[in-house]
Amino acid sequence: MGYFDLPRFCDVCGAHPASVKRYVVFEDGRIAELAVCAYCAMSDRNLLTADELEAILPQEDCCPTCHTPLSKIQKSLYVGCADCYDHFRAQILKNVVECQGRRKHIGKRPGGKRNG
């Protein structure tokens, strides 16, 4: 089921059927997606298209090969491809030092100890 499969009225005026998506950016940085009618979409300059929203958002550094963003690597602790290591080398080394207290990665079981 798509975005406009059910009858929906404009989130701005409430008088006309919604026909397009627009975005609004609040002063605190939150972003809201709105379903709006054609009239409100054209008349309200605070409502942004997806392209306009993308243009004003800060662009995140991504791996040139797999396009994995640094924030995803930091959150998951997994890289997207081998080239991520080269592209994000400084940040990855910084994270290793923060996690392990040293620059060299020691793995889950330091000293090569095996379970069982």
Image: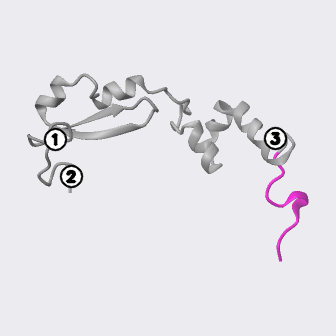
Could you tell me residue 45's position as x and y percent? 25, 22
Confirm whether residue 71 shows in the render. yes
> Residue at 39% of width from left, 23% of height from top?
55
Residue tagged 3 = 97
Q: Quadrant of the C terminus?
A: bottom right
Distance of mark 2 from mark 3, alpha carbons? Answer: 46 Å
Q: Residue furthest bottom?
A: 116
| Disc 3/disc 1 C-alpha distance (Å) | 51 Å
Which amino acid type corresponds to the residue marked 3 in the rendered image? Answer: Val
The secondary structure type at the circle numbered 1 is: loop
The image position of residue 25, as x and y in percent, is: 37, 31
Disc 2, SS: loop
* Quadrant for the N terminus in the image: bottom left
Residue on which the image places disc 2? 2
Can residue 79 be seen in this snapshot?
no
Magenta stretch bounds: 105-116
Residue count near mark 2 (Cα–Cα under 10 Å), binned few <14, some 14–19, many ≥20: few
